[in-house]
Image (tube, rainbow, N blue to C red):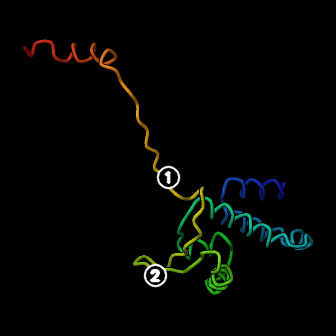
Amino acid sequence: AQVIQLAAALETTRFADFWSLAANCKSMLQSVPGFYDAVRDNILHLLGITFQRIHKSVLATYLDMQPAQVDALVKERASSGWAVLPSPTGELVQLPKCEHNTMVVKRTQEVIRLEQVAPVLRSVTVGFY
């Protein structure tokens, strides 16, 4: 039952809930080599395809890390585009841009013939002669 709750929390991106649940079954999870690192890598992947920037305090909560640990993580990943940026609302962590977290403007052009809009024009111009 605990494993199902842990999986559900991760799958629904309730990361703080996941870490609370994980604390309750620490002995079981510590027996799995690399479990915590794999979970953090998964969370970082999800955040990386979702955000370009995230508050450092939120990232620390999502990863169950202290601010100094987040600083070390950002420094370790600086070569791939990670950085800590000052902000009026606290420090932000800049994540690398990718195709998933970057807005793309799509321009479409549709050709509309006069015959298609003529009935609409007639209906709105009746009485304006």
Q: Secondary structure at mark 1?
A: loop
Quarter-wise, where is residue 79 in the image? bottom right
Q: Is residue 8 above or below residue 83?
A: above
- Viewer-side label of 1, 2: 1
Q: Is residue 112 left or right of residue 127?
A: right
The residue indicated by pointer 1 is 104
Residue depicted at 74% across the width and 63% down the height: 42
Quarter-wise, where is residue 81 in the image? bottom right
Residue depicted at 53% across the width and 58% down the height: 102
Toward the viewer: 66 or 123?
A: 123
Which amino acid, mark 2? Pro
Q: Secondary structure at mark 2?
A: loop
Which amino acid, mark 1? Val
| Residue 56, image x, y percentages | 56, 76
Toward the viewer: 7 or 46?
A: 46
Q: Is residue 51 left or right of residue 129?
A: right
Toward the viewer: 25 or 12?
A: 12
Give residue 86's mark: 2
| Residue 46, image x, y percentages | 66, 60
